[in-house]
Image: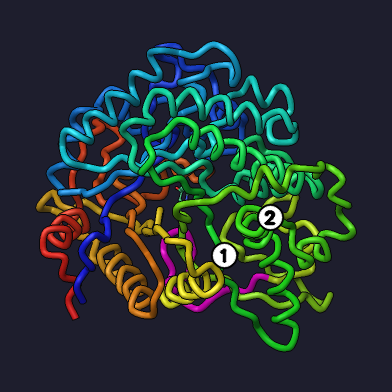
Amino acid sequence: MRIPSGFLLGAATASYQIEGAVAEDGRGPSIWDTFCRTPGRVHDGDTGDVADDHYHRLEQDLDLMARLGLEAYRFSVAWPRVVPDGRGAVNRRGLDFYSRLVDGLLQRGIRPVATLYHWDLPQALQDRGGWLERDTASALADYAAVVADELGDRVHTWTTLNEPWCSAYLGHGNGVHAPGLVGRVEPLVAVHHLNLAHGLAVQALRARVVADAQVSLTLNLHVFRPDGPTGRDALRKVESLANEVFLGPVLEGRYPDAVLETTRDVTDWAFVRDGDLAQIHQPLDVLGVNYYNTNRVRLWDGTGARQQSDGHGRSAGSAWPGAEDVEFLEQPGPHTEMGWNIDPAGLTELLTGLHARFPELPLLITENGAAFPDTVADDGRVHDDDRVDYVRRHLRAVLDAVDAGADVRGYFLWSLMDNFEWAYGYSKRFGIVRVDYDTLERTPKDSALWYADLIRSRDLGT
Ligand code: IFM
């Protein structure tokens, strides 16, 4: 199987997960700084204070990317580094960091792909209501304008939001992500304000970036498999909350009926104002797709303990408002260290399904990868054959979708290096480069060497 010419092979990271330097050069606090300091929220009390120290090791990390031969690099800009209070004064030193990053990529022939928001909301905005407050959407657009004025001449692809599903439902539904709120209507209010933020940010970007830059949104679209006689009903509910609530307004200009039905006893959506859907429904050049696993669902019959293996941890709240009667069943193995099942066929189905529904819309895999319990062998290397196998099989799944007609433009491996895995702290390693958290030394794992070879040969084998 050969990688088609023009198909980009890259790797991805996000600001809070790798940068560290949280109190340096004028950066303000983010909701994740606060969350990490709240006892019991993050594994072992880990924080992003140092993370991979990427902020101080930028040149070294750029050289590493060049050695691997990456064709593109997806990073996120930390809003609290650029506009420390969320609104108002711009921090020049924050912008300078990203400007150096983009220049460093271009000097090495690597295409920069920038995400504006990968979950590190300035704490000052959270203090004023965060994503429950409509004004946060226009604050994101103002921040987008600042970043685009600085980097708009050099960035190849822009993504407004990363996985708004996580921001909304994990942040405001089951509370396992910052800001750690538990509620039913709150995640849906957050969904709408995130959708609005996306639409306003697209408009701010379009007015400023070079004409051939691509503007996108990255969604972690879920693939559900129905189980038994109630599987279809369950699927309709969770699909509406996970996928349709974003695809509908962003790409079709409406909240679909299935969303309104599923959430009927939660909200009347009165927070959606006249004109909002037109603001949200902006043309996109490409849709970013993050994919890791699938879920098997059915309706709970009210007896026995309800199964809840949705892969995002347990809490007092639910990430599925209006679909609390859906059971997430344990999936057969193999699983990654996150407990997520390995199901590459789901990626092919997702991509071909998206292509059938939105035939004009190019797709980009903005994240795919796996955490495994890596060990350092006696020879000092990490022989992560399981990760190589995972990536190879998922890349094949992408190429299967391309063969079936889907217009997929590239693949970004999550992640370039081990990093802060949110509520799991540093306990899960997704990197193709190992980071020793004591010395911060970087060591390419076997998967990195394999990926570098693949980028050179563009041959995925048979
Ligand atoms: O680490 C995260 C990333 O920040 C968003 N997508 C999923 C990854 C693995 O959980």
> Within 8 Å of ligand 1, the CB of disc 1?
no
Side (left or right) of 269 relative to 116: right
Part of the protein shown in magenta: 328-343
Name the image quarter holding residue 248. Answer: bottom right
Where disc 1 sits, the SS reads loop
36, 321: nearer the viewer: 321
* Residue at image location 73% in from the left, 54% down from the top: 318
431, 368: nearer the viewer: 368
346, 147: nearer the viewer: 147
* Residue at image location 29% in from the left, 55% down from the top: 374
Q: Please say which color scheme the image uses.
A: rainbow
Residue on which the image places disc 1: 222
Q: Main secondary structure of the magenta part?
A: loop
Locate residue 336, reporting x and y percent.
41, 64
The 10 Å Cα crowd at callout 1, few under 14, some 14 to 19, many 20 or more, is: many
Q: Dividing the image into 4 quarters, which one contains the C terminus?
A: bottom left
> Within 8 Å of ligand 1, the CB of disc 2?
no
Q: Is residue 226 above or below residue 338?
A: below
Q: Is residue 178 at least partly visible in the picture?
A: yes
* Residue at image location 68% in from the left, 74% down from the top: 235
Q: Is residue 233 above or below residue 34?
A: below
The label shown at residue 253 is: 2
Locate residue 265, reporting x and y percent.
90, 58
